[in-house]
Amino acid sequence: MKDLFKSSHFKLIVVIIAMLLVGMFLCAANGHGETAQSTVIGTIFTPAHWVAGKVSDGIDKITDSAKGNAEYEKRIEELEGQVGELQDQLADYNNLKTQNELYKEALELENDNPDFTYIQSSVIGRDSAYPYCSFSISKGTSNGIKDGDPVLYGKYLVGVIKKAYPTYSIVSSIIDPDFSVSAYDINTRELSYVTGDSEIAKEKMCKFENLDSATKITYGSIIATAGISSTMPKGIIIGTVKDISNEETNISTYALIQPGVEIDKLDYCLVLTGYNTGSEE
């Protein structure tokens, strides 16, 4: 113990404590005045003040950053809300635009065929596993729709009602191999029929089949319904000719038909529920 009191470390500690006490007395006596002694004391404590200041500054910066991030997050949320509203408005605009186009087409159809009666319907579903663009619509037998009714988009034929249920119906498109309708070329008046084909359906097209090898039908010719069936009026446009080819299994020729509308992208359609057959040519 005696050695401890005599050691240099102990003496240094005593000197430091003494200096601290002197500094305290000087500060108390002189107030805030500057003296040589207070300068020494200040020098001793400056590093501690510097570290404390830096820590305080860091805390302030962290606090400010947190506040800034909160404001950014709030602003981002506001902007995301505005974007969502604009997207909703754009969707509404596109829906109205599509409906207006359909109304315009329907008005032209009605003006050209005042004897037609039809029902507007929305497309409510598609079978992605079925490659022939069949779809379901929001109207059915309770609305006056029945099996076999033509389905149109304006003046273009897109298919027929395959099966009508009370509140909805299934539409078979014109590119379905099960679909068939009498048709003619409005320029050459050549008569035959249009049907779907499993291979051609991959290109979203159908066939104007059983044509003579000397056919005068050419690229761009318009093919329309012939009206031979009692359920299908004459003059509904099916599409335009994109190519003429020969059948591999026989000597006949067929025309490749591109539908007048993109069936797989329809949102609305018209179901022709009746017409006056006496007005046809």
Image: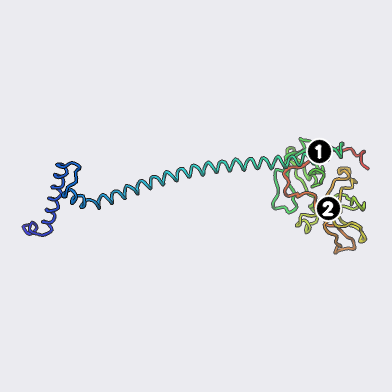
Question: Where residue 98 sits in the image (x, y, percent)?
Answer: 73, 42
Pick the residue in front: 188 or 128. 188
Residue furthest out toward the left: 2
The amino acid beneath tag 2 is Thr
Instruction: Kindly indicate whether the residue at mark 1 contacts the one at mark 2 (C-beta within 8 angstroms).
Output: no
Work out how far the residue at label 2 is from the one at label 1, CA to CA, in angstroms.
22 Å
Question: Where residue 262 sits in the image (x, y, percent)?
Answer: 75, 50
Disc 2 packing (10 Å; few <14; some 14–19; many ≥20): many
Tag 1 secondary structure: helix
Pick the residue in front: 245 or 104. 104
Tag 2 secondary structure: strand
Q: Residue at x 82, y 44 (%)?
A: 155
| Label annotation for residue 240 | 2
As displayed, is residue 163 above or below residue 213?
above
| Label annotation for residue 107 | 1
Pick the residue in front: 192 or 3. 3
**Disc with the residue nearer the chain's start (2 vs 1):** 1
As displayed, is residue 58 above or below residue 210?
above
Q: Quadrant of the C terminus?
A: top right
The amino acid beneath tag 1 is Leu
Q: Quadrant of the N terminus?
A: bottom left
Disc 1 packing (10 Å; few <14; some 14–19; many ≥20): some
Left or right: 142 as drawn, with respect to 32: right
Question: Where residue 43 sits in the image (x, y, percent)?
Answer: 21, 52
Which of the 4 quarters of the picture holds residue 6? bottom left
Which of the 4 quarters of the picture holds residue 200? bottom right
The number of callouts visible is: 2
Question: Where residue 190 sits in the image (x, y, percent)?
Answer: 92, 53
Residue furthest out toward the bottom: 248
Q: Residue at x 89, y 43 (%)?
A: 230
As displayed, is residue 44 above or below residue 31?
below
Pick the residue in front: 182 or 239. 239
